[in-house]
Image (cartoon, rainbow, N blue to C red):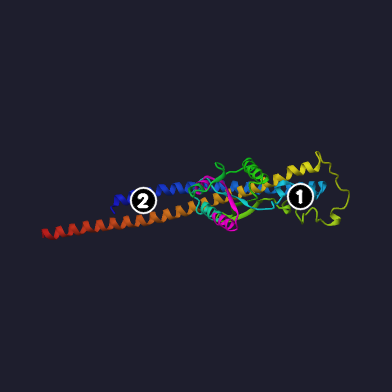
Amino acid sequence: MAQRDVKNRIGSVQNIRKITRAMEMVSAARLRKAEERAASLRPYADALRKMTRQAAQAAGSGELQAQPVLQTHEQEQTVGLLLVTADRGLAGAFNSQILRAGLQRAAELEADGKSVRWYATGRRGLSSLTFRNYEVAASYTGFTDAPNATHAHEIAEELVGAFVDQQIDRVEIIFNHYVSPLVQEVSRQTLLPLSKAEVEVEGDPAADAAPEATAGPKALVEYEPDPAEILAQLVPEFVEVSLLRALLESAASEHGARMTAMRSASDNAGEVIDNLTLAMNRARQAEITQEIMEVVAGAEALN
């Protein structure tokens, strides 16, 4: 390869490395924000759980069990699978492992005689499913790197409506659980029907406090409207919170995976540049050696 060609290739790789380094820095900044948003959701989820538990105690366990999102359908025929993917690629195996897990789960359900109804967040999941000729009941795109409560509400409204109307008998969500920037684990959880344990938690620290710590007059709570109506509003909120948590976990995983992938790409680009530089120096050295030999040969011919 000529020196000029090697120089051009080195320049191209250097430009690519600038891009990958910039993408790595952007992903690192977005990852910190995603981690903060995921952490900030926990206090709200804990408060919601406590409020729901108190309302359920006031309304009676029968009211809690009567909530539509807690009802198990007698004959489970159709299962909704929600794949949480990204709108963009360049994130390593982030999207492919979700699709692989979803297809594997669909095969298991179909082997049990159940049909699958597909849902997807992110353009990558939608395009992968449509490419394989799967019909997608609903898709949600344009927000996967920074989801919020509005997006969770939109998705939950669709899924709860289909579940209550018995179009689907169970909803499972498959997403990347964030462990660290280097590790994202595929997780699958049942979103609907909502488990009673999710809203009536055993071992509540407030309920299990020592008698001496809770001694004294207890606060009287007056509900307006009545506890049953409040409960009917709080329980569906649990679906949205569970969904939002999965979306935030997925967003953090996406940024972590992309940051790691871009760092690896930058490192690989550096190795390519080093190898090309070494090849160029060798070619230059060989060219200089050849010129010296030609000069020496010419001088000997004159003598």
Who is closer to the viewer here, 129 or 10? 129
Amino acid type at image mark 2: Ile
Amino acid type at image mark 1: Gln
Tell me where residue 223 appears, x and y as whole percent. Answer: 82, 41
For this view, does 239 lie left or right of residue 58? left
Q: Which mark is residue 2?
A: none
Q: Residue furthest right?
A: 217
Distance between the alpha carbons at the discs numbered 1 and 2: 67 Å
Who is closer to the viewer here, 302 or 151? 151
Residue at the spot x=83%, y=57% of the render? 210
Magenta stretch contains residue 126: yes
Q: Residue furthest top?
A: 225
Tell me where residue 182 appears, x and y as whole percent. Answer: 54, 56
Residue at the spot x=42%, y=48% of the render? 16
Q: Which residue is mark 2?
A: 10
Q: Is residue 294 above or below residue 128?
A: below
Q: Which residues are magenta?
A: 103-128
Q: Is residue 144 visible?
A: no
Residue at the spot x=72%, y=50% of the render? 71
Q: Dot 2: within a 10 Å radius of its alpha carbon, few (fewer than 14), some, or many (20 or more) residues?
A: many
For this view, does 164 lie left or right of residue 281? right
Q: Which residue is mark 1?
A: 65
Question: Which callout, 1 or 2, points at the residue further toward the start of the chain?
Answer: 2
**Secondary structure category for the residue under label 2:** helix
Q: Nearer the viewer, mark 1 or mark 2?
A: 1
Tell me where residue 158 appears, x and y as whole percent. Answer: 63, 42
Q: Is residue 154 visible?
A: yes
Q: Quadrant of the N terminus?
A: bottom left
For this view, does 142 lie left or right of residue 194? left
Tell me where residue 185 appears, x and y as whole percent. Answer: 58, 56
Q: Is residue 284 above or below residue 236?
A: below
